[in-house]
Amino acid sequence: MKIFNRLLILAVVLFQTTTVFAADAPKPVLNPGDTAWMLTSTALVLLMTIPGLALFYGGLVGKKNLVSTLSQSFMITAVVTITWYVCGYSLAFMDGAKGGFIGSTSRVLLKGIGIGDLNTTIPETVFFCYQLTFAIITVALICGSIVERISFKALFFFITIWSIVVYAPVAHMVWGNGYLNTLGVLDYAGGTVVHINSGIAALVLCLVLGKRKAKVKPHNVGYTMIGASLLWVGWFGFNAGSAVAANGNAGMAMLVTQLATAVAAATWMIIEWLTGENKPSLVGMCSGAVAGLVAITPASGFVGPSGAFFIGLAAGIVCYLTSAKLKNAIGYDDALDVFGVHCCGGILGAILTGVFAVKAIGGTAGALEGNVAQIKLQLIGVVLTLVYSGVMTYVVIKVVGLFTSIRATDAEEREGLDLAHHGETIA
Amino acid sequence: MKLVTAVVKPEQADNVKKALNKIGIQGLTMSDVKGYGRQKGHTEFYRGSEYEVAFLPKTKLEIATSSKKLKAVLEAIQKAAKTGNIGDGKIFVTSLTEVIRIRTGEKGEKAL
């Protein structure tokens, strides 16, 4: 039976001569080490959203919106799993026209997936789950800008549509055989797909939704620290897992992730310490760490330690300015700084990937090694993601708004969304 | 009989309890409360945004005592709660008309 399966795989591989596998490419073989690491990474990245991101956001909102904020991440985990199964995965990762916009429908409802199917050296089932956890956290990240006032019902419909019409094409263009990948844009673990994508969507949504009636200070900085720590740890699965192998690239990705994150956390802390506020806040350290994690994400498989150090430093400075200064100067109510940290950090990381990429590590040279053109490619990836995600987010929320009110009523907002939308409170 | 209500700094509450034990006070009620006096609140910063915190955490201690012991109680609380800094708190004294020990039904000073 095993022999039959292998023959079948070989036959499939041989038939796909026009796409990823060249006719003379070696037959993919399952690697137990890679598979074990990717099973682990999948668990780590799921942990980033529940409970990591949920607690990170939950601690930053007011007490009467904790249940609401936790519910958003949990609901998204459930719903995006379903949309990913129905068609998201197929549209993102099945080969469409080379250099195109969207994948194919060959794995809709996971048609035909079996235990013998491989993606490179790991089972396709594991690859499906691993990529699913990225789709989940991308969508969950958006919620940070719209907490304390979004209608839960509207959010439910919005993310159902968004995960298919925005996430899947962007993932396909960057990681499938789509346009940006074919062009040579570098995004190791999701600087464009996850962070710019969710960050610009968050900005558009908070502009459409309008400001909160009242800004409330974080109600539990402890939750925020626990959440940020789970994000930090989980990010090893996110970045080192993006090697889709247990090898030297995964090891280097882990190292640069740790280094950039630590530098960004320390940088943000020192800025707060030395400037207006005069005290190193825990929320500031956590924010700096997340900024570093975001900025190193696209670069993690392409840069070495010195690149990581500068990326972390830049992320700490730039994301502090965009979150603490730019937002207040312009006056949009991106409640938990999804745009300031994820979109701006993602753009910074994408561009700096083009600067610091080392040929000996990821196979592509950056500007410092003479390949200045890579920065231009990176910018194309940034702009395309900003425009596509920004415009489509606007369209999707407007469509949802035709059927249901997208904002909680004033009374619900005053009462707190915990009681108004979920009938539960924490005290 | 008197009811003494002392609102003190949370970090001084243990001191007060020990001092009251020393002079033979058998029981008290403690609650975490929030409030402000002349000290007013303070300001917190999160990611560059300023938040006014109007109410500060305090500990409220309620002690029922005989009128005879009142002076000793007040002195013990003042001594134990005082740091000399702003925000040390206040003591309120009110008359107490009745005390009943629920288990035995004892009333008045016997129930203290």
Image: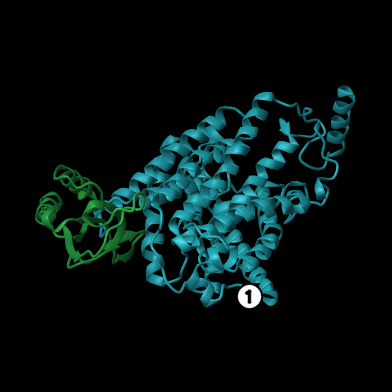
Chain colours: A cyan, B green
Tell me the chain of label 1.
A
Closest to the observer, A64 or A324: A64
Which residue is nearer to you in this view: A393 or B45? B45
Residue A87 appearing in the image? yes
- Residue drawn at 77 percent across, 53 percent down: A87
Packing grade of label 1 (10 A; few <14, some 14-19, many >=20) is some
Q: Position of residue A361 (x, y in %)?
A: 53, 33
Picture residue at 60% right of the left edge, 49% below the top: A185
| Residue A206 in the figure: left or right of residue A162 | left
Residue type pointed to by label 1: Ser
The residue to which callout 1 is attached is A405
Q: Secondary structure at mark 1?
A: loop
Give the side of residue A148 with respect to residue A15, left or right: left
Could you tell me which residue is drawn at 52 percent across and 41 percent down? A235
Q: Residue A403: horizontal and vertical position, in percent?
A: 70, 75
Q: Position of residue B27 (x, y in %)?
A: 25, 48
Q: Answer with the quarter of the image where residue A387 lies.
A: bottom right
- In the depicted structure, whether residue A360 falls above or below residue A54: above
Looking at the figure, which quarter contains the N terminus of chain B? bottom left
Can residue A103 be seen at all in this image of the molecule?
Answer: no
Marks counted in the figure total: 1
Pinpoint residue B74: horizontal percent, then vertical percent.
12, 56
